[in-house]
Image (tube, rainbow, N blue to C red):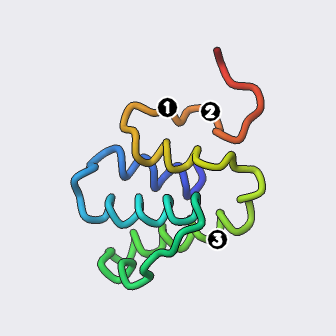
Amino acid sequence: MDALHKAIQKIHSDPENPTSSVLCSLIKSLDDGHQFDINQLYQLSYGDFGLALEVVKQWRLDSFRYERGAATKLATEPGAKIEFPYWSPARPS
């Protein structure tokens, strides 16, 4: 599983957790191009900090494949399904 999906699963597993809030803000910022206060990353545990860095690295490498708004939707809607890659052109109907 890639870093973005791991972060989204972490957000869905405990949406009220401060870590979820930071990861969600990071994903939304990457997805919509708005600023992100990098100091928020220092609130994270070392493992979650590493996950956030992996999300940024993955986004840098793969952002051309992502549909704008899809990652934000997955991160912010607890019922959103993440079984299929959201960049995949063939989605189940």
For disc 2, the marked residue is: 84
Q: Are marks 2 and 1 in contact (CB under 8 Å)?
A: yes
Identify the residue under disc 1.
Answer: 81
Q: Which residue is drawn at 39% across and 69% down?
A: 48
Query: Image check: 82 left or right of 67?
Result: left
21 with respect to 59 (left or right)? left
Query: Residue 81 location in percent, x, y?
Result: 49, 31
Q: Between disc 1 and disc 3, whose residue precedes? A: 3
Q: Earlier in the sequence, mark 3 or mark 2?
A: 3
In which quadrant is the C terminus drawn? top right
Secondary structure at badge 3 equals helix
Q: What residue type is labelled 3?
A: Lys
Q: How crowded is mark 3: few (under 14 residues within 10 Å), some or many (20 or more)?
A: some
Disc 2 to disc 1, C-alpha distance: 8 Å
The residue closer to the viewer here, 89 or 2, is 89
In terms of secondary structure, where does tag 1 sit?
Answer: loop
Q: How many marks?
A: 3
Q: For residue 57, which numbered disc appears in the image?
A: 3
Question: Who's the residue at 60% across and 53% down the image?
Answer: 2
Horizontal and vertical percent position of residue 31: 58, 58
Mark 2 surroundings: few (<14), some (14-19) or many (≥20) residues within 10 A: few
